[in-house]
Image (cartoon, rainbow, N blue to C red):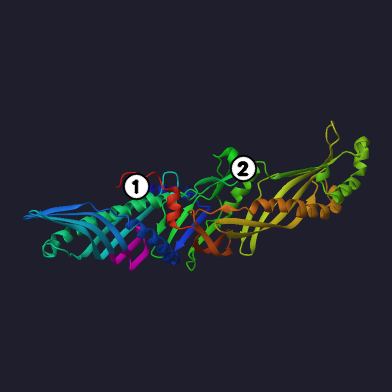
Amino acid sequence: MALFGTLFLALLAGAHAELPGCKIRITSQALELVKQEGMRFLEQELETITIPDLRGKEGHFYYNISEVKVTELQLTSSELHFHPEQELILQITNASLGLRFRRQLLYWFFYDGGYINASAQGLSIYTALELSRGPSGQIKVSNISCQASVSRMHIAFGGTFRKVYDFLSTFITSGMRFLLNQQICPVLYHAGMVLLNSLLATVPVRSSVDDLVGIDYSLLKDPVASTSNLDMDFRGAFFPLSDSNWSGTNLAVEAQLQEEERMVYVAFSEFFFDSALESYFRAGALQLSLVGDKVPHNLDMLLRASYFGNIVLLNPTVIDSPLKLLLQVTAPPRCTIKPSGTTISVTASVTIALVPPDQPEVQLSSMIMDAQLSAKMALRGKALRTQLDLRRFRIYSNQSALESLALIPLQDPLKAMLQVGVMPMLNARTRRGVQIPLPEGINFVREVVRNHAGFLTIGADLHFAKGLREVIEKYQPTKAADP
C-alpha cells in the first residue's frame, strides 16, 4: 500500500511538472572553442598569483625570498569535457610557470641580495565545475573542486653566495612549491565562483522585449550533463508587462533535442510562440484603426461605393464624413508547427464606419476575418527573428450567408491592404527579434532551422564577439578580499 501511494505521488508530481518552452543543448563540438577562449582568460588569472614572502634560517644563514611574480605561463596540454555528475571538467597537465623574485641572504655580517629567475615545471591542475539553477532561475556555478600541484622547481642561483644558495636550494624550492600549490586553486575558485558567475549573470532571466511584452527565461531545473552534451530547460514564456504575473498553461508538445553535430541547439515549442501572441493580445497590441487619410484611397472609394445604399438609408448627411476601418483580433492567435512549415492562425473583426465631426460613428458593416500567416524563423547574432507572410485570407458575415456573398468584392482590396499596410508593420516588430539566453559577447553563426511536429530546432555554431576578459571586467563586482 505504501508503495502504491509513493507511485501515485510520483505520477501526480510528474503530471504537474512544468514543460519547457525553450531548450538549449551545448554539445562537445563547442568545447574546443570554449576551451581556447577560457584558457586565454585563465592564463591571465594565473599570472596574477601572489606568493607570500618566504623566510627561513638554517644555522647561521638567514634567507628571505620576496616580491615573487609570475613572468611567463605555458599551458601546453589541456582538456575540457562534460561529466555526468560535475558538468564540466578541466584538466591541465605538464604546464610550466616562469617566476622572478628578490633574494636576500645574511651570513654573519655578510649580505647578498638581488633578483633571480625560477621556473616551476610539471604543473597539473584538475578542476570540476558544478552548474545549477539559482534562486531566481538563473544559471550559475554552484561549486568548484580543484587540485593543483607542481612536481619540480628550478632556481638558477648565482653570485657571491652561489654555493650557499645551492645548499639552501632544497629548502627554498620546497617552500616555494608548497606556497605555489596553495595559491593556484584559490585563484581558480575566484575565477569560477565570482568572475564566471558575473558572466553568467548576463544571461537574461526576466527581461522586456519591448514596451508591451517581456519574456521569462528562468531555468526550470538544474542543467543536466552527459558525456557528450549539456542540456538546459528554460520556461520560455512571454508575458504582458501590464500583468507580469500572468502565465499561460503549456499544453504543447515538449521539444526534443537529438542532434549533436553542431556546437549548440535551441528548441522552441509551439507554447513559446503562443505565449508571445497571447501576451500581445492581452496587451491590446493586436488591433489597428485607420481613419480618414490613413485608409488607402482606392479602398476608401470602393468601400463608399459598396455601402452607398446603407449610407443613404442610415444618414445621407454624413456621406462625405471620414471613413474608419477598425481591425481587432478577437482571440489570441495560435501557432502551428509542422515539418512542412510554421503557420499562425488569426481571427479578427473588421468594422467599417463613418466618423462625422462631433457626432456618433455611423457603422456601415461588421464582418469576421480569418487569416493564416506563414512564419519563417531565423537566428541572427543571438536574436530569434520572424518573417511573416499572408498566405490565406477570407472575410464573411456573422449575420447571414447573403451578406457574406455581398462581401466577396471586398475580399481582394482588403487582402491587398493587409499585405501593403499591415504586414510591413508586423514585420518591423518581429524583425527586431527576441534574445536567446546566451551570455553577453557570445553569438550564433551558421544557423540551420528545422521544423518538427509541434516544435522547431535551430542548430548553430558559437562565435565570441567579445573576449571573456572584456565582458567579465565590464560586469565584475566590486573586488573583495581574496578568498
Q: Quadrant of residue 183?
A: bottom left
Question: Residue 56: x, y in percent?
Answer: 13, 53
Most extreme residue toward the left is 59
Magenta residues span: 73-96
Q: For label 2, count other residues whose C-alpha is less than 10 Å away and answer few (under 14), some (14-19) or many (20+).
A: few
Q: Is residue 477 above or below residue 339?
A: above
Most extreme residue toward the top is 358
Q: Quadrant of residue 447?
A: bottom right
Question: Residue 195: x, y in percent?
Answer: 39, 51
Residue 188 falls left or right of residue 368: left
- Residue placed most toward the observer, 326 or 270: 326
- Earlier residue among tags 1 and 2: 1
Question: In the rendered structure, which amino acid carries the disc numbered 1?
Answer: Ala
Measure the alpha-carbon separation of dots 1 and 2. Answer: 53 Å
- Residue placed most toward the observer, 75 or 370: 75
Magenta segment: does it hold 83? yes
Magenta segment: does it hold 136? no
Which residue has dot 1 on it? 2
Question: In the rendered structure, which amino acid carries the disc numbered 2?
Answer: Asp
Callout 2: helix, strand or loop? loop
Which residue has dot 2 on it? 211
Residue at the spot 32% in from the left edge and 63% down from the top edge: 73
Residue 123 falls left or right of residue 196: left
Q: Are marks 1 and 2 in contact (CB under 8 Å)?
A: no
Residue 303 falls left or right of residue 113: right
Question: Residue 471: x, y in percent?
Answer: 45, 53
Callout 1: helix, strand or loop? helix
Residue 142 appears in the figure: no
Residue 203 falls left or right of residue 360: left
What number is the disc on residue 148?
A: none
